[in-house]
Image (cartoon, rainbow, N blue to C red):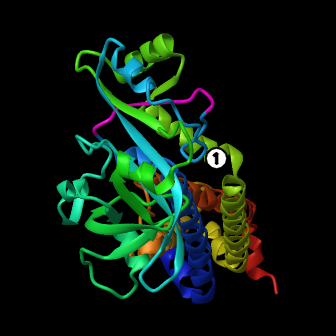
């Protein structure tokens, strides 16, 4: 019976191809859009990810994300260091600056100022150069993606000159950082040097980053800092989730991508359901013949379910392959780095594809169950 079911399915190549493409298109759209969505929102916490040494972030109580910052007084760092359970704490500066490259072009960029003595706050991966050279006057490090954008068509090199807010900056290192939500150009320098590039006022310390004592959790130490200083303190994990949720709740990204995903599911249900129903309808005489020679309804339903499973497996495999190739190909572009297809999205899309196939099969099975064997002898 199963071999007959497969022959019936493969015989009508046009409908078989249409069914596969319907499942494949739905799978491709769901995986591609959800992968982009996850890549976008994870960029909201990229600055936090780039500082793996710190597990506590301290900021003004009104700060909601990494982009809206109210500077702290320099004296606050001493108060934070005095809280029991804080192993160390250093300042971190973050600001947007305008840069002028050697060819005169203006670009918006992100400036990160790290602790002068320890250089804590830099991404751990160094592509070229030595981070100790940041202690030189006017020295900066630039992200790899930022170098490609500022000095286009040039190989990685050190000693390049740029102007940050009309001040001279010399590139002494190239670092690999996480893709940012707002800008792909990131410069890193010492905290004191960053203040010279910006000079925004009396209070300029954006964050205080620190690490909890080994015997205490970051969450417990963060609560102690809040109680002792009145500042807002969070673990790195909690602050990253707060930054991500701010983007989810205050932008149109979830609605836009969610609408596309929903349309992909609806298209898959409509196309696959309609075409599978037509496929069963056109083969109704064959099912009636099998019924007339004694095939039970259970066997007929098993045939229909087998056909649906084959369509779903092939269509899902093609759609998942297409989504994987999209991220593999697009990920080679510097502006698209950091986007990927998580495994749980692939599993979830597989469940959606299975639901589409099951609904299509159930919709078509009613015709098989009530097929009249006498239909074979009708004109």
Q: In this view, does 358 lie above or below 217?
A: below
Q: What element carries label 1?
A: helix
Residue 269 makes an appearance in the image? yes
Q: Where is residue 322 in the image (x, y as percent from the top left)?
A: 47, 76
Give the camera-side residue of 317 and 158: 158
Measured from the top left, where is residue 13 in percent x and y? 57, 88
Residue at horizontal 56 percent and vertical 48 percent from the top: 200
Label 1, residues with CA under 10 Å away: few <14, some 14-19, many ≥20: some
> Would residue 377 appear left or right of 293 to someone viewing this image?
right
Q: Nearer the viewer, residue 305 or 34?
A: 34
When the figure is inspected, residue 191 is found, relative to residue 106, above or below; the finding is: above
98 left or right, relative to 224: right
Q: In which quarter of the image is residue 300?
A: bottom right
Of all residues, the one furthest to the right in this rendering is 379
**Residue at mark 1:** 248
Residue drawn at x 28%, y 38% is: 53
């Amino acid at each position: 019976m199963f071999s007959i079911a497969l022959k019936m399915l493969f015989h009508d190549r046009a409908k078989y191809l249409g069914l596969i493409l319907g499942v494949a298109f739905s799978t491709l759209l769901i995986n591609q859009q959800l992968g982009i969505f996850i890549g976008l929102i994870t960029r909201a916490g990229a600055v936090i990810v780039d500082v793996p040494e710190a597990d506590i972030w301290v900021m003004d109580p009104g700060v909601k994300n990494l982009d809206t910052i109210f500077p702290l007084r320099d004296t606050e760092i001493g108060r934070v260091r005095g809280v029991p359970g804080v192993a160390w704490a250093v300042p971190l500066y973050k600001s947007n600056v305008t840069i002028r490259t050697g060819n005169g072009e203006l670009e918006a960029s992100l400036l990160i100022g790290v602790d002068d003595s320890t250089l804590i706050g830099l991404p751990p991966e160094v592509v070229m150069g030595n981070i100790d050279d940041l202690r030189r006057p006017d020295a900066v490090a630039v992200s790899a993606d930022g170098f490609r954008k500022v000095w286009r068509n040039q190989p990685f090199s050190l000693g390049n000159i740029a102007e940050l807010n009309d001040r001279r900056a010399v590139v002494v290192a190239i670092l690999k950082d996480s893709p940012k939500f707002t800008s792909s150009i990131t410069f890193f320098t010492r905290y004191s040097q960053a203040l010279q590039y910006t000079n925004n006022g009396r209070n300029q310390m954006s964050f205080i980053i620190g690490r909890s004592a080994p015997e205490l959790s970051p969450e417990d130490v963060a609560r102690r800092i809040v109680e002792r200083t009145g500042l807002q303190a969070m673990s790195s994990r909690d602050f990253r989730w707060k930054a991500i949720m701010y983007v989810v709740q205050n932008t149109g990204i979830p609605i836009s991508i969610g609408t596309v995903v929903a349309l992909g599911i609806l298209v898959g249900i409509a196309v696959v359901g309609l075409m599978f129903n037509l496929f069963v309808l056109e083969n109704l005489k064959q099912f009636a013949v099998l019924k007339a020679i004694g095939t039970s309804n259970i066997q007929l339903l098993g045939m229909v379910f087998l056909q649906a499973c084959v369509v779903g497996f092939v269509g899902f495999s093609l759609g998942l392959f297409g989504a994987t190739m999209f991220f593999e190909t697009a990920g080679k572009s510097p502006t698209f780095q950091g986007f990927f297809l998580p495994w749980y999205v692939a599993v979830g899309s597989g469940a959606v594809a299975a639901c589409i196939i099951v609904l299509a099969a159930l919709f078509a099975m009613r015709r098989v169950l009530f097929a009249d064997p006498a239909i074979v002898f009708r004109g």
